[in-house]
Image: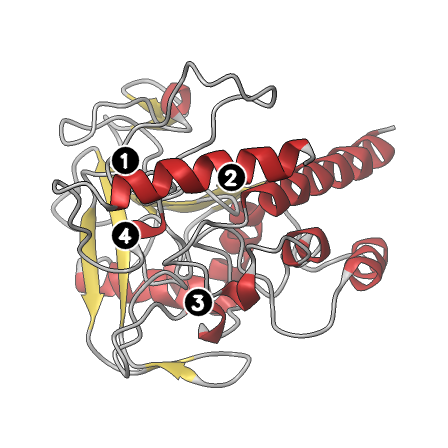
Amino acid sequence: MDQNEIRTARLLEKRHSSLSSPSFSPDSSAASYNTLGPSSSTDSTSDDPEGPEPAYANVVSGYKLYNHPHSFPLDYGGQLPSFSLAYETWGTLNADKSNAVLLHTGLSASSHAHSTPENPQEGWWEKFIGPGKALDTNRFFVICTNVLGGCYGSTGPSSLDPSDGQPYATRFPILSIFDMVRAQFELLSSLGIDKLAASVGSSMGGMQSIAAAHLEPERVGKIVSISGTSRSSPASIAMRHAQRSGGSHFHCQQCCSFADCDSSRTVLMADPNWKRGFYYDELPPHTGMKLARREFISSVWGYSVRITN
């Protein structure tokens, strides 16, 4: 047995033990996606040389939920019969609702950009949001969503397909950046926000910030796009094509259904636990996910360094 087979056997044993526990009662098959069962913590004392196995289930809390009950057409064809967006806010919306800032996330981030009373855990932009900070909550009402297709409360591949009550998995439609942004504007409209003071984001969020101004120029006051782009370069398109594997599109962990994020799916889909994306009642493709993430980060940083130099 190699190290991956040993790890898989160990995790399967732990998961089966957890699932057979009388205290285990998942709300859905997607909830049981966590290796050790929902709400279970991983063993930090594990002797795995690659460190403790992450909890793959939905682990955030404290967000609000916008429910869109109507059919939502998508750029690449098809539609969602309805969708939900998880979001969090900081600061106070002023009387004329003109001080809203929409903060767009990178590829795999949740809506939890900053701590809140509902979720005091430090957010991924904790140092940049707050009184007197870059996104000054004394002046602005900051909104951050988990994007459509995400795995932290918003509708995505781990959500249940209303047609059969099972997780969408790889049946979930491919999304565009425009689809994500259109969904966010539906949320803004529900909050009575006609125009943003600014559209802000980095990485994939930087793409969204530009897309927001392109789609709704009258509803965006300013753009802050950090490490973003309005379109893919020939080099990145060539990289994606070289790394692309035929078949269904790539959904990483519970979440990704994004057409521009298939660079690492070959190694992920080679994991025996991939099972064409229908792994929600089984052990997730943890080995493939680790390797895919390494490959993705290496290519992103390598490409960034070449551009910077």
Quarter of the image where the C terminus is located: top right
Residue beneath disc 1: 140
In the image shown, does 8 or 186 lie closer to the viewer?
A: 8
Quarter of the image where the N terminus is located: top right
Residue type indicated by callout 2: Ala
Residue beneath disc 2: 9
Contact, mark 2 vs mark 3 (Cβ under 8 Å) = no
Neighbourhood count class around disc 2 (C-alpha, 10 Å): few under 14, some 14–19, many 20 upward: some
Residue type indicated by callout 4: Ala
Residue drawn at x 19%, y 40% is 21
Q: CA distance from mark 4 to mark 1?
A: 35 Å
Badge nearest the viewer, 4 or 2: 2
Contact, mark 1 vs mark 3 (Cβ under 8 Å) = no
Neighbourhood count class around disc 1 (C-alpha, 10 Å): few under 14, some 14–19, many 20 upward: many
Residue type indicated by callout 1: Phe
Residue beneath disc 4: 31
Q: Which mark is residue 191?
A: none
Badge nearest the viewer, 2 or 1: 2
Provide the secondary structure element on which disc 4 rests.
helix
Sequence-wise first label, 2 or 3: 2
Badge nearest the viewer, 1 or 3: 3
Provide the secondary structure element on which disc 1 rests.
loop
Sequence-wise first label, 4 or 1: 4
Sequence-wise first label, 4 or 2: 2
Sequence-wise first label, 3 or 4: 4
Residue 13 found in image quarter: top left
Q: On screen, 50 above or below 17? A: above
Q: Which mark is residue 169?
A: 3
Does the image show residue 222? yes
